[in-house]
Image (cartoon, rainbow, N blue to C red):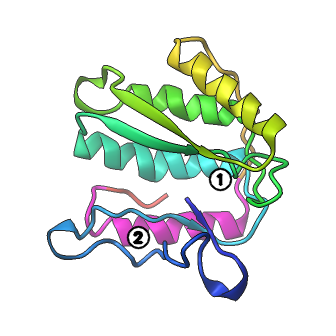
Amino acid sequence: YKRRVHGGGFYPHHSGGLSECGKGRGVGRNVNIPLVGTGHGDDVYTAVFEQIVVPILSEFQPELLLVSAGFDAVRGDPLGGMCVSPALFGWMVSRLQTLGQGGDGRLVLVLEGGYNLNAMSQCICCCVKALLGDSVDCEPIHELSAVASQLIADAVQMHSQHWSLTEP
């Protein structure tokens, strides 16, 4: 997930736009899901994950998942501007363990960053709990805003050109 920042680009390299889907033989293999604005939380991230990420990974069937585990979307991070709970990061790890060839959990998490050390440590703890097979409880999901619904619908429409996605 990318976040739009000042000047219209996406952090950190002013790339990551929805239409940037790869080139040549890689067309469709680059899946950007830009979340324009700030304040998106568990509801939006869960919807994006279930409606776009999970179906694409289920279709692709990777042998191994490598995750650059950045936590700047966690609530309280001074740079990310999002409102994702630490528990949702653990929940996403639990879901990722069921995907790929055989769903045998071939998953590698590489710590990438975050800028609120307290919140980041909570995220890491939830992810490790998930890797160990412990359940991770998430906050209840509320109805999506019209803006979030449109962001997701746009991403589904773009990526359904290359993957079997259905409109939300």
Label 1 sits on residue: 44
Callout 2 amino acid = Gln
In the image shown, does 26 or 154 lie closer to the viewer?
26
Q: Amino acid at mark 1?
A: Val
- Which residue is situated farthest in the bottom direction here? 7
* Quadrant of the rendered image containing residue 7: bottom right
Q: Nearer the viewer, residue 121 or 38?
A: 121
Point out the stretch of residues depicted in magenta.
Answer: 144-164
Q: Give the x, y percent position of residue 47.
A: 57, 49
**First reached walking from the N terminus: tag 2 or tag 1:** 1
| Magenta segment includes 68 | no
Whether 147 is among the magenta residues is yes
The image shows a total of numbered marks equal to 2
Residue 148: image quadrant is bottom right
Q: Which residue is at the front of the view, 60 or 86?
A: 86
Residue at x 81%, y 45% (from the top left corner): 116
Q: Residue at x 38, y 26 (%)?
A: 98
* Percent x, y of residue 39: 79, 60
In this rendering, the answer to whether 107 lies above or below 11 is above
- Residue 37 on image: x %, y %: 72, 71
Element type at mark 2: helix
SS of the residue under disc 1: helix
**Can you tell which quarter of the image residue 106 is in?**
top left
Give the residue displayed 36% in from the left and 23% down from the top.
Answer: 105
Left or right: 43 in relation to 81: left
The kind of secondary structure the magenta stretch mainly shows is helix
| Residue position marked by numbered label 2 in the rendering | 157
